[in-house]
Image: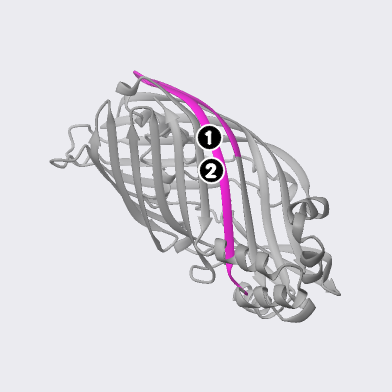
Amino acid sequence: MKKILLFSLCSASLLMAGYSEHAYLYKDARIMGMGGANVAVGGYSTSVFHNPAGILNIKKSHGLEVELLGLGMQASTDIQDFADDIDTADSDAQKISDVLKKYSGDHFNLGLSNYSSVTNNADSFAWSVGLLAAGDANFIAHGSGGASGLLETHSRGYGGVVAAVASSFENVGPGTLDVGIGVKYISQQSYEGGIGVSEIVDNQNDLATYLQDKYEKKSSGYGIDLGVNYKLSPQNYWHPALGMSILNIGDMKMDNNYGKQPMTVNLGASVSPEVAFLEHFILAVDYVDLLNANETRFYNFTQSAGVVTSLTHQDFEETDFMKRLRLGVSAGIIDNSWFMATLNAGLYQGNYTFGIDLQATLVKLGFATYAEEIGPETGDLTDRRYMVNLGIGW
């Protein structure tokens, strides 16, 4: 109740704001289209970001799997309209204030990423090594009119190395136990704070550089991930599997800046019945961050003449059940050496997801839409996003 009352107070205040997006390093359109449920599914090189044991579910027939130039882009629904309106306002303080008022309380995200990797799954042992380069920019408009308008930002550029190994153990009870371990090193430059109307006017031609000069903080961290998947008897029609992962053991604190990666305990379950006319059919459910490690960060901005002069923040526990629930379904339509097509759908943080995954020879193309909950509880602030992945691989 204390948290809810505090959030209500912050939402009513013109100079306070809360931010509660769950921490992540990489989002794959193939997985997000399926509601983000991958703890007990795996099957991709990017499964290392959910459960390192999942690379054992990559088809052995694929041999050495190489994914180069795995370019990704995601953006919020109305970010182009917001950017156009800011640009049209030019250097007029009142017009910029009107734009912030028009979009007050809305959240905008723009993300770019490249994850290139080499993965091999052979017999009962698999390994994967990948290079990550990414950035995401988040903005929230607060329009109180006049010089009190505020544009809040939570942004970062980051990259590093991700590696995992996994091994399979047969005849463990009635099934097979897959065990994986992952390691990663990430460095980042993060930017969290706010800029007032006067700052936007004076630096509109190079706002990114101004934000960098005012708020940039550099940090880095190492992380260790552990994961297991238990697959029941292969003769079972449903092919049930249970998964568990512990990510970022010890926390990648990143000096407590935006972009920190708390240790999370994640559970998953899936079934993969054989369905006529489909290459695969998967139903999955995940419950992530079992111990509620993700937090809501509340900010207090103070301004003078349209310039943010000070920034303080405080973190509070965030425990919303629906934000941690993932449901997904994946249907493989075609899968041969020349072409692959998969349809995905699901429920992520209480909102629908949908995705299409295509591969023609060496070219991979994925599309997905999902909605991120930015507030501490589902429905406080929902940001619908669209993402595209384009890569070359074999």
Image quadrant in which the N terminus is located: bottom right
Residue where numbered disc 1 is placed:
115
For the residues labelled 2 and 1, the Cα–Cα distance comes to 8 Å
First in sequence: mark 2 vs mark 1: 2
* Residue 379 is one of the magenta-drawn residues: no
Residue 6: tell me if it is visible. no
Instruction: Indicate whether 55 appears above or below 296.
Output: above
Quarter of the image where the C terminus is located: top left
Question: Horizontal placement of 216 versus 272: left or right?
Answer: right
Quarter assignment of residue 364: top left
Rendered residue at 51%/38% (across/down): 71
| x and y, in percent, of residue 80 in the image | 56, 61
| Residue 108 highlighted magenta (yes or no) | yes
Q: Quadrant of residue 231?
A: top left
Residue 249 visible in rendering: yes
The local crowd at label 2, few if under 14, some if 14 to 19, many if 20 or more residues have their Cα within 10 Å, is some
What is the secondary structure assignment of the residue under circle 1? strand
Camera-nearest residue between 103 and 281: 103
Residue 85 spot, x, y in % from top left: 62, 68
Which amino acid lies under the numbered mark 1 shown in the image of this protein?
Tyr
In the visual, does 173 lie left or right of 151? left
Can you tell which of label 2 and label 1 is closer to the viewer? 1
Residue that label 2 marks: 26
Main secondary structure along the magenta-highlighted residues: strand
Q: Residue 190: horizontal and vertical position, in percent?
A: 72, 48
The segment highlighted magenta reads 104-133
Element under disc 2: loop
Observer-nearest residue: 320 or 393?
A: 393
Does the CB distance between marks 2 and 1 fall below 8 Å? yes
At 72% from the left and 81% from the top, the residue drawn is 145
